[in-house]
Amino acid sequence: MGIVGSWTALNAFPSGLPWVRMITTSIGRWTTGASYPGPEQAFVDEGLFFYHESCANGGAGLDFTDLFYGATTSQGFLLSLPDGALQPIGMIDLASNYALAAGAPPIGPFLGTVLESRHLIYTNIYD
């Protein structure tokens, strides 16, 4: 097991950016329970985050402000847990499109362009 990092959605208002925390917008759903992925919903996400990269800097960590974009799914087929219970599950998949290290000067452009992803957030959510 590695060193645990952390992230927090930031309130970007009134910076001129459209985000107040992370914005999630529905983009559709599947309704059939007979085939994959089951009755599942899909969302597109975007937001400004504080990201702590624990493994960087020799284990001392580095802090970043990141613009993240990605998707969330909710419901769908049930997940079989180790104890045998069945649980609805969702997934959040986010990738940073811009990462600014704490104390570093901003280097543009950071909106309206596709940049290299420095950080990824992949996590399960239990409904």
Image (cartoon, rainbow, N blue to C red):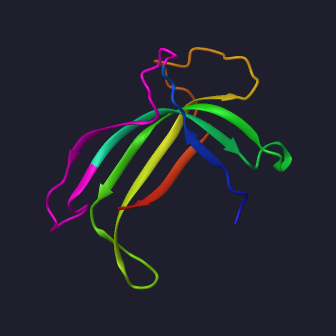
> Which residue occupies the extreme bottom position in the image?
84
Q: How many marks?
A: 0
In this rendering, the answer to whether 108 lies above or below 74 is: above
Q: In the image, is 2 to the left or to the right of 113? A: right
Please say whether residue 19 is one of the residues in the magenta stretch: yes
Q: In the image, is 85 to the left or to the right of 41? A: right
Chief SS of the magenta region: loop
Residue 67 image point, x, y percent:
53, 30
Front position in the image: 66 or 97 = 66
Instruction: Tell me which corner region of the image, top left, top right, bottom left or bottom right, holds residue 87.
Output: bottom left
Magenta-tinted stretch: 14-41
Instruction: Tell me which corner region of the image, top left, top right, bottom left or bottom right, holds residue 110.
Output: top right
| Residue at x 76%, y 24% (from the top left corner) | 103
Front position in the image: 63 or 111 = 63
In this rendering, the answer to whether 8 lies above or below 81 is: above
Residue 115 image point, x, y percent:
55, 26
In this rendering, the answer to whether 114 lies above or below 88 is: above
Residue 78 image point, x, y percent:
31, 71
Residue 37 image point, x, y percent:
26, 61
| Residue at x 60%, y 14% (from the top left corner) | 108
Please say whether residue 86 is one of the residues in the magenta stretch: no
| Residue at x 56%, y 35% (from the top left corner) | 49
Quarter holding the C terminus is: bottom left
In this rendering, the answer to whether 84 lies above or below 25 is: below
Front position in the image: 69 or 20 = 20
Quarter holding the N terminus is: bottom right
